[in-house]
Image (cartoon, rainbow, N blue to C red):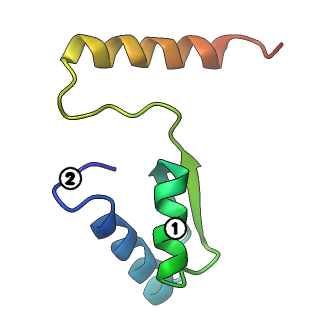
């Protein structure tokens, strides 16, 4: 959940959409950061968090991002065990 005002702006928008439109919202990001912000706003249960186990920071080189993406894809394709 990037951006100049992240994740606060995205959380505020999600809460507004859920309340005003009755929309089901999925927020992708760090669960601990998002859940505390949602709780502070009394967010409706229609907002769910998809935990991001790896986060790309703004100072990472593009090659690092691609390597992280490849690890994630490989992990999803591998059978559990």
Residue 68: mark: none
Total label count? Answer: 2
Position of residue 51 relative to residue 65, above or below, is below
Going from the N terminus, do you reach mark 1 or mark 2 first? 2
Q: Residue at (42%, 78%) from the top-left corner?
A: 17
Q: Give residue 59's quadrant in the image.
A: top left
The picture places residue 6, in percent across and down from the top left corner, at 27, 58
Sort mark 2 into few (<14), some (14-19) or many (20+) by Cα contacts within 10 Å: few
Q: Nearer the viewer, mark 1 or mark 2?
A: 1
The CA span between labels 1 and 2 is 19 Å
- Give me the residue at 33% from left, 60% from top: 7
Q: Is residue 25 or residue 56 the one in the foreground?
A: 56
Outermost residue, right direction?
81
Identify whether 31 is placed above or below 77.
below
Residue under numbered circle 2: 3
Q: Nearer the viewer, residue 43 or 60?
A: 60
Q: Which residue is mark 1?
A: 36
Extreme residue toward the bottom, this view: 20
Relative image position of residue 12 (x, y in whole percent)? 35, 75
- Dot 1 crowding, Cα within 10 Å, few <14, some 14–19, many 20+: few
Residue 37 locus on image (x, y percent): 46, 70
Q: Residue at x 44, y 89 (%)?
A: 20
The quarter of the picture where the C terminus appears is top right
Secondary structure category for the residue under label 2:
loop
In the rendered image, which quarter is residue 35 located in? bottom right
Q: Position of residue 71 (x, y in %)?
A: 50, 13
At x 32% / y 14%, what residue is drawn?
66
């Amino acid at each position: 959940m990037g951006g100049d005002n992240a994740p606060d702006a995205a959380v505020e928008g999600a809460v507004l959409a859920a309340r005003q439109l009755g929309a089901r919202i999925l927020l992708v990001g760090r669960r601990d950061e998002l859940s505390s912000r949602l709780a502070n706003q009394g967010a409706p249960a229609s907002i769910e968090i998809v935990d991001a186990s790896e986060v790309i920071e703004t100072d990472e080189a593009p090659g690092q991002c691609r390597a992280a993406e490849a690890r994630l894809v490989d992990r999803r394709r591998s059978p559990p065990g």
